[in-house]
Amino acid sequence: MDFGVAIFPTDQTIDPIEMGRATEERGFESLWFPEHSHIPTNRETPWGGRKGAPDLPDYYWRSYDQFVALGAVAAATTTLKLATGITLVAQRDAIWTAKQAASLDAISAGRFLMGVGYGWNKEEMAHHGTAYNERRAILRESVLAMKELWTEDEASFDGEHVSFSSSWAWPKPAQAGGPPVILGGAAGPKTAAHIAEFCDGWMPIGSRHALDSGWEQVKRACEDIGRDPSTVELGIFFGKPDREELDTLEAIGVKRVVFGMPQGPRDEVLEALDGLAHFNG
């Protein structure tokens, strides 16, 4: 089982380049950067869409662009996998995002993992012209369109939300078929169907319970379209650094656990990395 770490790269915590080097030096498999383009000040949506959630921390609106930050980390590392955790695909232009993802994968010699998610902030989406109730359909079409751009010399796509005629788009990703697409979030029937259709992995937030509650739906969705469920890689975002729980996760097939980092100053982040490094032994 591989271990990664996730942190919002901001101007108030460790520099993302130093974070990348330190993560690689300590033997971690991957580094995950989230994204938010901005946070509207008149936001009414609670944090994560959860009623009663605490106030949103300011690092949500202070984070660097994830592709720019990961590109800088790519230049400073050699083996570390570079991951978005997550890219808010429904708020983005699919063609430009495909270009960014392919460029990062090519520049890093195939080290990019593309974590995607539907998003929760209604006001942020509205500023991008994204209708909240359409975000799942937009994400689906965007990912399918990006896969066309990554793999076809002359790509085209004709969907309800994403559409373009025959086009050239380079560079192509270093990884055959494009970077792995990993969907975050709990798996209900619609999410499970999306995982089966166009994802290489599923990584909910939480623990074994998060997997148990959705994995059966993912398996059924795969079987419904004739896909082998074992081709979906299982992981956990913000896993608990507890050896007994990690051993249990590994036994049920989890391939990757991503630990959350503190959003504090440099020394606090490095101390936290040091405290988790023994799991890589």
Image (tube, rainbow, N blue to C red):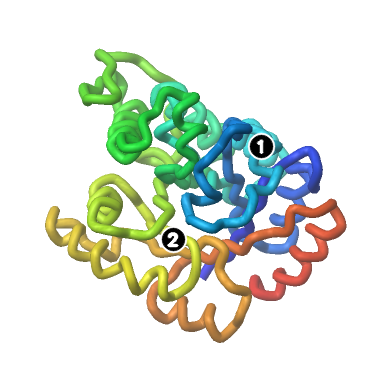
**Residue 227 placement (x, y as % from top left):** 19, 57
Q: Report the side of 96 relative to 191 (left or right).
A: right
| Circle number at residue 204 | 2
Residue 220 vs 64, above or below: the answer is below
Residue 46's place in the image compared with 256, above or below, is above
Q: Which amino acid lies under the numbered mark 2 shown in the image of this protein?
A: Pro
Q: Is residue 147 visible?
A: no
Q: Which label sits on residue 61?
A: 1
Q: Residue at x 32, y 37 (%)?
A: 133
The residue lying toward the viewer, choosing from 225 and 90, is 90
Picture quadrant of residue 9: top right
The image quadrant where one finds the C terminus is: bottom right
User: Is residue 223 depicted above or below 14 in this figure?
Assistant: below
Spot occupied by residue 46 in the image (x, y as percentages of width and height): 53, 48
Under circle 2, the secondary element is: loop
* CA separation in Å, label 2 and label 1: 23 Å
6 and 227: which is toward the camera:
6
Q: Residues within 10 Å of mark 1 (few under 14, many from 20)?
A: some
The amino acid sitting under disc 1 is: Trp
Q: Which one is nearer the viewer's eye here, 170 or 208? A: 208
Give the mark nearer the N terminus: 2 vs 1: 1
* Residue 30 location (% of width, % of height): 59, 55
Q: Nearer the viewer, residue 125 or 187?
A: 125
